[in-house]
Image (tube, helix red, strand yellow):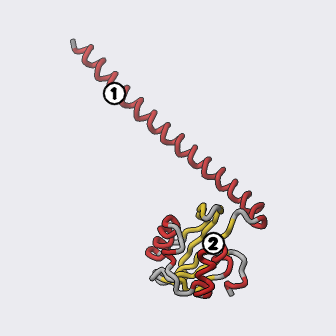
Amino acid sequence: LIHHIYPGIAIINSEFKVVESNAGFIEILGDDAKEIDEVIPGLIGADIKTLLPNEMLNHLEYVIKYAEDVINKDFEYNDRFINVSIFSLVANKSVCMIFRNLYQEEERPEEIIHRVNDVIKENLLQVQQIGFILGEGAAKTEKMLNSIIKTYKEQIGQR
């Protein structure tokens, strides 16, 4: 089934070995993976730790260990902008990785709109959080300064 899907797909087991992959996955990995594919079709049994950069491996290890999905994480890899989703197939046993090359023409329009909306939402959330923190800080500062003023007024009044 995964061999007929365009995005790169790899199924990885808890020993970090490739259980199954498609041509899109091998294409994204580049020339070294293509050479390995000639010897080991589909990279089956290959150690994924030798194929992926550490940043991706960290997310893969997290999903295998905690069975919590990592969806739509972007990486720059082999001079490409790659979107990777990693999700658990069987908790703590196997995961599926889906790779999309965002430089591909067919990926761009919908993906760009989606990403722009995500950036807008994230920035608005950050602005709200900053506003809350500033308001909270101003209230604490005002309270402390009023307390200091009150203390000094009491000391002046006692003399």
Residue 154: give x, y in percent of width and height. Answer: 27, 19
Disc 1 residue crowd, few under 14, some 14–19, many 20+, Cα 10 Å: few
Where residue 27 sits, quadrant-wise, is bottom right
Residue depicted at x 58% and y 84%: 43
> What numbered label is drawn on residue 147?
1
Tell me which amino acid carries mark 1: Ser
Residue depicted at x 50% and y 72%: 60
Tell me which amino acid carries mark 2: Gly
Residue 155: give x, y in percent of width and height. Answer: 25, 17
Q: Quadrant of the C terminus?
A: top left
Frontmost of labels 1 and 2 is 2
Q: Nearer the viewer, residue 157 or 70?
A: 70
Q: How far is mark 1 from mark 2, CA to CA?
A: 65 Å
Residue depicted at x 29% and y 19%: 152
Q: Quadrant of the N terminus?
A: bottom right
Residue depicted at x 51% and y 42%: 132
